[in-house]
Image: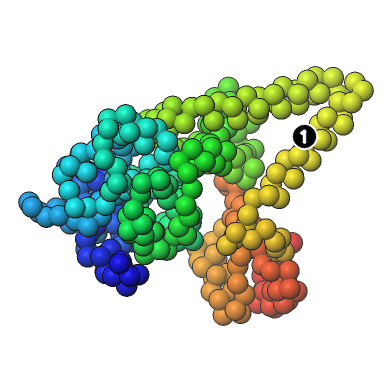
Amino acid sequence: MSDAQLASRVTGSVHIIGAGLLGSSIGLALRAKGTAVTIEDISEAAAALAIDYGAGSALQPGQQPDLVVVATPPDQAADVIAAALVRFPQAIVTDVTSVKWQPLKQLQQRGIDLTRYVGSHPMAGREKGGTIMARADLFVGRPWVICRDADTPALALALVEAVALEVGAVPMEWQPDEHDSAVAAVSHLPQVVASLLAAQLLSVKSDYLGLAGGGLRDTTRIAASDPRLWIQILTANSEPVAELLERLGADIADFAAALRDPAAHGSRTKIAQLLAAGNAGLERVPGKHGSSRSFATLNVIIADERGQLAQLFSDLDELEINMEDFRLEHSPGAAIGFAEISVLPEAEERALAALSKRGWRIV
């Protein structure tokens, strides 16, 4: 089947099982491109909300889709995938569960014919889930991992890849165990660390928390995630996450030991080494569009007044200054905030002069 035929097939018929954040976002993104999408959920209320939200329509009796996307929590994935393969005997079935080896192993143990199944996982999400958090642009520029099996037909792989491209994602093929090791490091471990750090705040005096700034908020943001979902994710990928936590725990123990006796020989060196290792690790994280290049940063003072941020964005647009990244720092009760704008180094001087000329204070 040609690429054009694949695109036509994707546009024709996709059914989504699971109307949460990922399922509804896929529906919104595909429908925005003209794809006919149907959607269902074990919760009638969730399905009705997704339909009202525009993520799809109800599946009609006898309707057979070309592709079925299973977007359920990990504990339910294998059962729903198996059922979908039976319900829709002509369809390719994929899932977007955040762990890949466990559901595949469970399906293999049942002796199910998996030639129409392709595991996949878009590396996109938000700290809070649910239909109302869905966005059509959730997958734009994000990796979409597709896990192939030795027996997976090329057509099935191509169809899932076509869907990933249709929603703006970047498809890539990985083995299931490789995927799970990767997400343990870049997704699951950060979630555990954020949750454990936020849990420490329960014993902190309320007055102390009033001093919190961007550092605490940045490192604990994802602690707002749903514990019910994360119990399933972490237990489904327990071994690689446990190994990473043990390594992290050893580093924390070394750091604490050095701080217990900072005057001891080698303590300051150990602290410096651990901090420097953090710098080195951060440098390995790809930036925008996968680039590791550094950007120049402008800190623009923003008055705590209605329309100030909108005006800054409008000025940047009129001045044709492209933001590579953006952060807003504003403490409760403060009269001003700081807009941290990242630009290409070669654009820094022009941006500084142009914004200053328009009355913006830059520090």
The structure residue drawn at horizontal position 42% and vertical position 30%, both measured from the top left corner, is 236
Q: Position of residue 128 (x, y in %)?
A: 41, 43
Q: Position of residue 153 (x, y in %)?
A: 33, 53
Give the answer, above or below, for where 357 lies relative to 288. Answer: below
Helix, strand or loop for disc 1: helix
Give the answer, above or below, for where 129 lies relative to 134. Answer: above
The structure residue drawn at horizontal position 73% and vertical position 69%, both measured from the top left corner, is 345
Give left or right: position of 249 versus 34. right
The structure residue drawn at horizontal position 76% and vertical position 24%, both measured from the top left corner, is 254
Residue 294 occupies quadrant: bottom right
Looking at the figure, which quarter contains the C terminus? bottom right
Give left or right: position of 193 versus 148. right
Give the answer, above or below, for where 161 lies relative to 223. Answer: below
Which residue is at the front of the view, 56 or 105? Answer: 105
Q: Is residue 279 visible?
A: yes
Q: How many marks?
A: 1
Q: Is residue 38 visible?
A: no
Which residue is at the front of the view, 234 or 144? Answer: 144
Mark 1 Cα shell of 10 Å, populated few (<14), some (14-19), many (≥20): some
Q: Position of residue 46 (x, y in %)?
A: 23, 44
Give left or right: position of 138 versus 221. left
Q: Position of residue 227 (x, y in %)?
A: 41, 31
The structure residue drawn at horizontal position 37% and vertical position 32%, both measured from the top left corner, is 105
Residue 1 occupies quadrant: bottom left
Residue occupied by mark 1 = 274
Check the image and name the residue furthest to the left.
Answer: 61
Give left or right: position of 346 versus 122. right
User: Colour scheme used in the picture?
Assistant: rainbow
Check the image and name the residue furthest to the front.
Answer: 151
Mark 1: amino acid: Leu
